[in-house]
Amino acid sequence: MDAGKSIKLVRSYSHIFITTLLGVIALAEGYRLGMAFENESFIAGPGGYIFIIGAALTLFSSVMVVKAVISRKTPVEGTSEIAKKAQTPEQTRRLKQMRLSFVLCVLYVVLIKPLGFAIASIVYLASSLALLRNSLKTTLITCAVMIPVLYFGLPAIGISVPKGIFGF
């Protein structure tokens, strides 16, 4: 494999490797936090949520790696520059939504500490649903259902989440 092809391969799949690395770090940190406290299981403690997110990231990233190895193609292989630039309006809209969704994820992570997990989650959920063009009615119903789950459901099953300035 020549150097140009290697660089192209790394650029094409760098997001998968970064996501896998973050998943493994979250798994290790969730396990470490969970074992630091005496609970029935490490999932029920403060590291449980982090561990579950890490497991999901690692699992989905691993699936993407397996698909890439099986197909043996880079995402841009066989696509000319002209074809890449000739996107339909729908593709452009979806790309914009994807970028905004990433920004919402970053804002969500930033807001968890000051606002707390529950409030930040509801803000993120409502923003994501609006971004996906759900109706106001659907967004309000979904948020109304999730509020009791976040405030009462998670503590009821022993999952500890960060509390914000309002104490919840």
Image: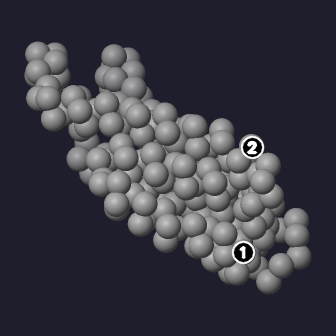
Query: Helix, strand, or loop for circle 1?
Result: helix
Please tell me which residue lies in front, 43 or 158: 158
Q: Residues within 10 Å of mark 1 (few under 14, many from 20)?
A: few
Which residue is at 41% across, 34% downward? 100
Query: Helix, strand, or loop for circle 2?
Result: helix
Please tell me which residue lies in front, 62 or 137: 137
Which residue is at 88% across, 76% downward? 38
The residue where tag 2 is placed is: 114
Q: How many marks?
A: 2
* Quadrant in the picture for residue 10: top left
The residue where tag 1 is placed is: 155
Query: Three-letter amino acid code at disc 2?
Result: Pro
Q: Is residue 113 left or right of residue 127?
A: right
Q: Position of residue 95 (x, y in %)?
A: 28, 32
Q: Position of residue 134 (x, y in %)?
A: 30, 53
| In the rendered image, the vertical position of residue 84 relative to residue 42, given as above or below | above
* Quadrant in the picture for residue 81: top left
Q: Quadrant of the C terminus?
A: bottom right
- In primary-sequence order, the first of circles 2 and 1 is 2
Q: Position of residue 52 (x, y in %)?
A: 60, 64
Mark 2–mark 1 Cα distance, whole angstroms, equals 19 Å
